[in-house]
Image: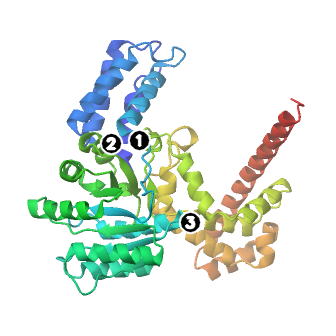
Amino acid sequence: MFENLTEKLQRAFKNLRGRGKLTEEHLDAALAEIRDALLEGDVNVGVADELLTNIRKKAIGSEVMLQLSPDQQVVKVVRDELAALLGKHAKPLFAAKPPSVWMIVGLQGSGKTTTTGKLAKWLTQHGHRPILVSTDVYRPAAREQLTQVAKAIGAALWPGAGTDKPIEIVKGAIKEAKLSASDVILVDTAGRLHIDDELMNELSVLKKELQPTEILFIADAMIGQDAVRSAGEFHKRLGLTGVILTKLDGDARGGAALSISKVSGAPVKFVGLGEKYDALEGFYPERIVSRVLGMGDILSLIERAEQVVDRKAAEELERKLRKSEFTLEDFRDQLRQVRKMGPLEQIVDMLPKMGPLANLPKNASVDEKKLKQVEAIINSMTDEERRDHNVIDGRRRKRIAKGSGTTVQDVNTVLKQYLQMRTMMKQYGAMALRGKMRGLGKLSGLS
């Protein structure tokens, strides 16, 4: 995400490098480039201009650390102002006395029903018991679609059979939630192709009846400022408590993400990063800013890894690293763990786009296929070959290539990658071990 915006901002910062001192002339030139980058990234004009005014004021004031170089000074101020623009991390709201009611609102086609399923999955993962209900009695098969979503994620559903009145449907859902000990009711409301009084009046009646703890607007990041304007209108009429940005993984510009809170007045609470039901994350402004500036999002990467990495397997790997016993089997298992973390392009997007990682590919879909090929090659080896790569001679390489549907050159490449990773892992293991020893020394008063 944000590839275009990140690339243009980094170009502006690069032009400041090598300057001995940050002058107003240099700053104005950099700000002009930053403004162009923001506008080309579909950031709201008013938001961009206000942001630049604040950046200029801070950059030429006394708030910048004197020991920083000019480009570092500007990056620091831009980072601080972008974080301020996006606001603080807004946690989801829950009623003091369950069940909490979350109204999911938005225009037709914005992804309300799918996002309702993603929210249910997220709530379940965080120890809640959601129940889903649809009040969309107009769109053909709308309630049936939510039924299929509920089945796919294993969530409870109130079908609302026997009535086509939204108020009666939600009253039934509230009673069912209390009987079934569900603590969050997710109300998938009806949408329209455009905002009209009929839609808003119906949602206002529902709001009055439900007294929801959350009114969440679903905004498609791919449509940029149209989503921002719609969010503002919904907030004016309903009083949104939050926004969920969908398809953020496909937004190379970033305008909606950077503008929507400021323009609409409602904080972004969640972001959708893919089609699967577990592809929903909390919105952390500082992490988004780090991605925009090419600094990566290591915290989100670690959190995602913690969800899929087996702790015992990790401890066993650490033991093998200490004893230099990292085998091709371990290599294959590590690749499997990486694939469990989600699409490779999302993982690459979380890595810093600087230093040794500056030239990472923007589109890693080809590498995704390569991972499967590597696994196929290792699977074609015998147990002995996976445990000891030294036994793999020319004859065995031909057999492995034939068994995996690849070439001997492909097999050679995998072996080379394995040896490179083995060396890297060995070095990492040694550093980690030294770090632990230093930590123990400090704790025991030895250093």
Residue 134 visible in this rendered orientation of the protein: no
Q: Is residue 161 left or right of residue 86?
A: left
Residue in the picture at 78% in, 40% down: 435
Q: Mark 3 and 2 residues: CB-CB less than 8 Å, in contact? A: no
Task: Using the numbered discs, state the Cα–Cα distance from disc 1 to disc 3 in whole angstroms.
Answer: 24 Å
Q: Residues within 10 Å of mark 2 (few under 14, many from 20)?
A: many
**What percent of the width, then of the height, locates residue 188?**
30, 69
Estimate the spatial distance between the alpha carbons at disc 1 and disc 2, rounded to whole Å.
10 Å
Q: Is residue 258 left or right of residue 290?
A: left
Residue at label 2?
258
Residue located at (44% from left, 64% from top): 98
Residue that numbered label 1 is attached to: 292
Tell me: residue 340, above or below residue 359: below
Residue that label 3 marks: 339
The local secondary structure at tag 3 comes to helix
Q: Classify residue 228 as left or right of residue 319.
A: left
Q: Is residue 73 visible?
A: yes
Q: Which-is-in-front pick, marks 1 and 2?
A: 2
Instruction: Name the amino acid type tagged 1.
Output: Val
Residue contact at pointers 1 and 2, CB within 8 angstroms:
yes
Q: Quadrant of residue 187?
A: bottom left
Q: How is the image coloured?
A: rainbow
Residue 336 point in image, percent of width and height = 62, 68
Mark 1 or mark 2: which comes first in sequence? 2
Q: Which residue type does callout 2 highlight?
A: Leu
- Which amino acid type is marked by label 3? Arg
The kind of secondary structure element at disc 1 is helix
Name which of mark 3 and mark 2 comes first in the sequence: 2
> Farthest bottom residue?
162
